[in-house]
Amino acid sequence: MYMEDKGISRKEFCKRLGFAYSTVTDWLNAEKYPRIDKIEMMANFFGVSKADLVEPHTADPAPAQPPAQKVTYYTYRIPVVGRVAAGQPILAQEEIIDYEYIDERLHKSGDQYFGLVVKGSSMEPTIHDGDTIIVRVQERVENGQIAVVLVDGEDATVKEVKESEDGLTLIGHNAAVYTPHFYSREEVEKLPVRIIGRVIQSISKF
């Protein structure tokens, strides 16, 4: 473990980085997972890369030194893009603006994920302008879930979704900015209105 290599106790580690002892214990036991900014703080403290903390390690080429151990189960890296267009996240290298880490167990389920930086305040206070959302790629969501939706081939919007026999309603949580928009079955087909994925997490940057 990196703390052992550095010769400090868990208590001292928490004190120096300002982490709660119970929180670090939860991380080490894989009961909770740190956000990317906390991973970055730890990487800087130990003098390693973020990938060293979160990604699986191969056998150490120098057997005399014990292999590094993972701090968390955040071992699968996903790209974060600034926008989604034409129904697909723009994953060209020049369009990737950051990376986030998700629980490897989610990746093992076979689902696909990407991150998206939210622009606008229509989903406040649930999701804020500038937040990064983690999106699971899927074409259907349950009523009341938040989804990334492509309308009329333009950049995608992030809204709560409610579906009925008559059509689809997109709901913003900030009514002062975005009133509910209803699309009939005909509009859903012709525009089209298409769900790209479900938002499973929102990460605020401070």
Image (cartoon, helix red, strand yellow):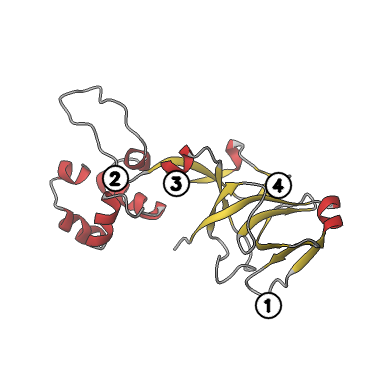
Which residue in the protein does label 1 denote?
176
Q: CA distance from mark 2 to mark 4?
A: 36 Å
Rendering coords of residue 195 (x, y %):
69, 51
Helix, strand or loop at mark 4: strand
Helix, strand or loop at mark 3: strand
Residue 68, label in figure: none
Q: CA distance from mark 1 to mark 3?
A: 33 Å
CB under 8 Å between callouts 2 and 1? no
Q: CA distance from mark 3 to mark 2?
A: 13 Å
CB under 8 Å between callouts 2 and 4? no
Nearer the observer, disc 1 or disc 3? 3
Q: CA distance from mark 1 to mark 4?
A: 26 Å
**Label 3 neighbour load within 10 Å: few <14, some 14-19, many 20+:** many
Q: CA distance from mark 4 to mark 3?
A: 23 Å
Q: Amino acid at mark 4?
A: Ala
Which residue in the protein does label 3 denote?
102
Which residue in the protein does label 4 denote?
85
Residue at 61% x, 67% y is 123
Residue at 66% x, 51% y is 140
Rendering coords of residue 173 (x, y %):
62, 71
Say which quadrant the C terminus sits in: bottom left
Frontmost residue, 183 versus 128: 183
Q: Amino acid at mark 2?
A: Val
Residue at 62% x, 64% y is 144
Q: Amino acid at mark 3?
A: Ile
Which residue in the protein does label 2 denote?
71
